[in-house]
Image: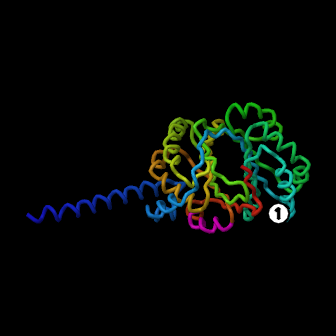
Amino acid sequence: ATEVPLMRPLIAILALAVIMIVSLRAFSRHPSLTGTITKSRPAFRASVLRRGLSAGARTKDTRVSIHPYFNVKEGKMDDFKATFGDFYTCVDKETNCFYYGFSVNEEEGVIYNRECYDSAEGLKKHIDNTAAVAGPVGDLCHDVKLEIHGPAEELKKLEDLAKDINAKMFVLDENGFTNNNMKPGKDTAVSIHPYFKVPADKWDQFVGAFEKYYEAVKNEPNNHHYAFSTNKEEGIVFNREQYDSAEGLLAHIENTAPVNEVTAGLFDSVDLEIHGPASELEKLKDFAAESGSKLFVLDENARCYK
């Protein structure tokens, strides 16, 4: 008569153990997101989410971002960094910019600029405004890789510009969102930049999974914005996503682990970058090493305008 009551808690414990093992295995199989997060616990994620940002008003993300990657000539890195202040001085006068800040990967000799504008017109005004400062920078670089990410209707207005500067265009998914919870002042946010190489025969399946990611991420209070963008001609899917801290990013990765099982096997490769303050990147070194992410140190004078 006592055997059944004793078996019930044992069965419950075994069932819970099986669920945890399956979840961790599913997460660890995702080729882009292996590493220290698989060792984390739900308590960690819960504590981060409870401590999250104050709620902002979530809206559709219709902003335009330009992604410049400057391949700096050997011995010219300090010269380039010396121009950062001039760029900031120019951008401080602009009214269409949301955030603006340089990030640097010394090992690769690459400088990136994390910047975003309210519209195509806002980006055009920025380019005109910084032309005098940007001109001399060209002599400090081997080349510059440029991308423009934004809604299809905004990219249409930028077609001539894109051709002139040889920029690749990424169409922002119409279901992407911003939580409007960034605070004006010093930018200390952490962003991860995944570039998925997706084969043509898997394209529709991968794009079809966007909705599942949005559903998972919309309840993350540590998220600033989250929107996929695509360049179908090149077969590349990108995600414009940003978090308040290293812990916010780690919590996001754990939170979306079940959805990763849906996209596993739908892409040939993924290139990962993480951009953020040195103090936050320090917390992400293990994850970066195990996931193959390149680290870009955000300049301490990076700005958030709105």
Give 42 or 51, whichever is nearer the viewer.
51
Residue visible at 15% across and 62% down in the picture: 5
299 vs 2, left or right, is: right
Crowding at dot 1, Cα within 10 Å, few <14 / some 14-19 / many 20+, comes out as: some
Residue 81 location, quadrant: bottom right
Count of marks placed on residues: 1
> Could you say where residue 16 lies in the image, as x and y percent from the top left?
31, 59
Give 273 or 99, whichever is nearer the viewer.
99
Residue extent of the magenta highlight? 278-287
Q: Is residue 281 magenta?
A: yes
Residue visible at 81% across and 33% down in the picture: 160
Residue visible at 72% across and 34% down in the picture: 155
Give 13 or 205, whichever is nearer the viewer.
13
Q: Secondary structure at mark 1?
A: helix
Which colour scheme appears in the figure?
rainbow
Q: Main secondary structure of the magenta part?
A: helix
Q: Amino acid at mark 1?
A: Met
| Residue furthest left in the image | 1
Residue visible at 42% across and 58% down in the picture: 24
* Residue for badge 1: 77
